[in-house]
Image (cartoon, rainbow, N blue to C red):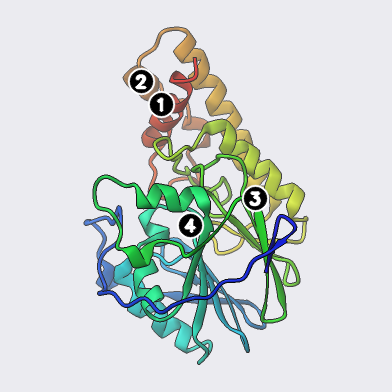
Amino acid sequence: MTGSGRRLAVVASLVMTCLVAGPRAQGNINFDAIEIQTVKLADGVYVLMGGAAQGNILVSAGPDGIFMVDSMYAQMNQKIVNALAKISDQPIRYVVNTHLHGDHTAGNAALAERGAVIVSHENMRKRMASQPTNPPPAAALPRLTYSDSLTLQFNGEEIYIYHPNPAHTDGDSIIYFKNANVMHVGDVPASLRYPNIGVNDGGTVEGMMAAGRQVMKVANANTRIIPGHLGPVIGFKEIEQQLVMFAAVRDRVAAAIKAGKTEAEVVASKPTKDFDEGRMGGAITPDRFVSLVYTDLSRRK
């Protein structure tokens, strides 16, 4: 395994812990009603979909074991394990988190109990470890972190993991299966929904847009892109549409802030209304998205 020109060696120890709900779990989700949908992208490459609130898990399954991107909420763990058992009888070796939010990390502890090594950007681990309320169990914290990028040779695949500048959060990871030409982009702008902006976790409007542009430089027009939610597969077209939306809403909100409008006034003006069609399937409402944009831009005046 290499990262930024260096070789990394990891000795993973088994971590035993009880199955608990992870950080930021939502109490209004009916986990019993959610079923995992498995989508095969190529031999040994799959996406596990748990619906809009759960996110998408990218999987590599082969002779080296199972590599996963994200872990959903802890309440989904048994359903995830059951879905994986239909794909492979190999152990779960690695879980890479795209960022710290609970719908992507709260299942970490249960997977670490099974022997998985949790991997993330160093900023993500720092934020998870320092949460003042609802801190995660120790087993949920990544055991392997990186600063810029790392590459893992696994199941005959070259898995490139890199950190964009602060975007959705300041600890994002984007994961690219180079041979299969499949990329998981976490919660940077991708699928047609209003994305969350982690304004309290180092995320910014400009960073989200920059990460979307960077994805299209690292990937190519034939790359199958896995968004953090919905999907399961999008391409450059959806990213470009999201960037157009972001730029328009950013400019409208920035102009309103300059004119002295309050957050409530800006939200009431519906600056996303011409983009709402097709973007109502996610967890972030148009009003919530505008509030997030306002929060970020108003502190940057």
Which residue is the site of mark 3?
A: 148
Of the 4 image quadrants, the one containing the N terminus is bottom right
Residue 70 appears in the rendering: yes
Give the mark, 3 or 1, whose residue is nearer the N terminus. 3
Q: What residue type is labelled 3?
A: Asp
- Mark 2 or mark 1: whose residue is earlier in sequence: 2
Q: Are marks 3 and 2 in contact (CB under 8 Å)?
A: no
Residue 107 in view, yes or no: no
Amino acid type, label 1: Thr
Q: Is mark 2 on a helix, strand or loop?
A: helix
- Quarter location, residue 18: bottom left
- State the separation of the CA atoms marked 3 and 2: 36 Å
The residue closer to the viewer here, 138 or 80, is 138
| Above or below: residue 9 compared with residue 248 | below
Circle 4 is placed at which residue position? 229
Looking at the image, tell me whether mark 2 or mark 4 is earlier in sequence order.
4
The numbered disc on residue 295 is 1
Q: Residue at x 61, y 40 (%)?
A: 165
Three-letter amino acid code at the position of disc 2:
Glu
Residue found at the very far top of the displayed protein: 259
Residue 208 bears which disc, if any?
Answer: none
Q: Which residue is drawn at 47% across and 65% down?
A: 143
Q: How far apart are marks 2 and 1 (CA)?
A: 8 Å
The residue pinned by badge 2 equals: 263
- Distance (Cα) linking label 2 and label 4: 27 Å
The secondary structure type at the circle numbered 1 is helix
Mark 4 → mark 3, Cα distance in angstroms = 24 Å
Q: Nearer the viewer, mark 3 or mark 1?
A: 3
For the residues labelled 2 and 1, say whether their Cβ atoms are less than 8 Å apart: yes
